[in-house]
Amino acid sequence: MSNQIFEIKKENIEYLMRKDPVLKNLIQRYGDLEIQMIPDLFVGLIYNIVFQQISYKAGYTIWNRIEKNLDFTPRLIIDAGLEKIKNQGMSYRKAQYILNVADYFLENSTELKNFEKYSDEEIIKELCRIKGIGNWTAEMVLIFTYGRQNVITFNDLAIKKGIRKLYELDHLPSKEELVDYQKSWSPYTTIALFYIWEMTKRNDLGGM
């Protein structure tokens, strides 16, 4: 894994605290966060496929095996084959998704050179062409590979539970409500998400 850290500027934190008193309390509770990035797109996609719909603990167990036993280049992933990938602790479906990503990289090497210049919407649309990559995985790439500052994710249960707890809602927020939160936090929505994820990692959700 890379040692590159997501850039969270003091003035961006101060902006969020002025905009949202509820979020301000959360930020003050947790203080400065250090968020590790995965600047390599290929590695980032594999990482987020691993973490699709499983717990942090399970995800890190599988990821540690993959880092130990597989080489992170498209050709070597393909050469490893479905069975070896699956044997790191994944389903056949996820193992196939990883192979799909490797195939995509081999077939689109020219286009990928300018990928980081694409808009958020363009990156999501392009990545979702790969079978096994949905909006959530693409949004995680925007955040943890490209360091985009204003990403909202609509299908992350931890974020929904965190918002329900933080804002004392009696329901998980809808897509429309999440858009409203993004408008409130813009242009630093991603930083707000980091603090809400931190609630989940610390099991600080009460009974939610």
Image (cartoon, helix red, strand yellow):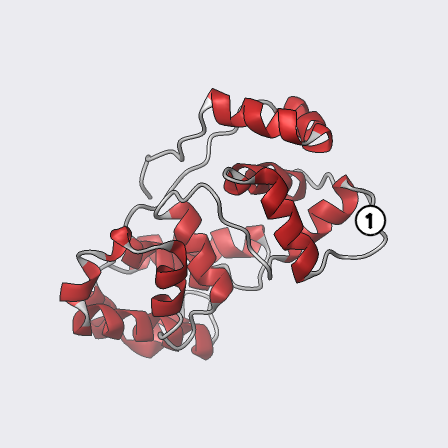
Residue 200 position (above or below residue 74):
above
- Left or right of 82? Residue 178 is right
Whole-percent x and y of residue 70? 28, 60
Q: Which residue does the image show at 55% across and 55% down from the upper left? A: 153
Residue at the outermost left position: 110
Q: Nearer the viewer, residue 190 or 176?
A: 176
**What residue sits 40% from the left and 71% below the top?**
128
- In the rendered image, the vertical position of residue 155 relative to residue 18, given as above or below: below
Residue 100 image offset from top left, x and y in percent:
32, 75
Instruction: Estimate how packed mark 1 is, as few (under 14), some (14 to 19) or many (20 or more) residues with alpha carbons within 10 Å.
Output: few
Label 1, on which residue?
Answer: 169
Regarding residue 158, the answer to whether it shows in the image is: no
Q: What is the number of callouts on the image? A: 1
SS under mark 1: loop
> Which residue corresponds to the image point at 39% horizontal and 55% vertical from the top-left?
120
- The percent position of residue 78, horizontal first and vertical second, equals 23, 73
Q: Nearer the viewer, residue 192 or 107?
A: 192
Which corner quadrant of the image does residue 119 belong to?
Answer: bottom left
Is any part of residue 163 visible from this angle? yes
Residue 162 place in picture, x, y as percent: 70, 46
Residue displayed at 54% across by 40% down: 186
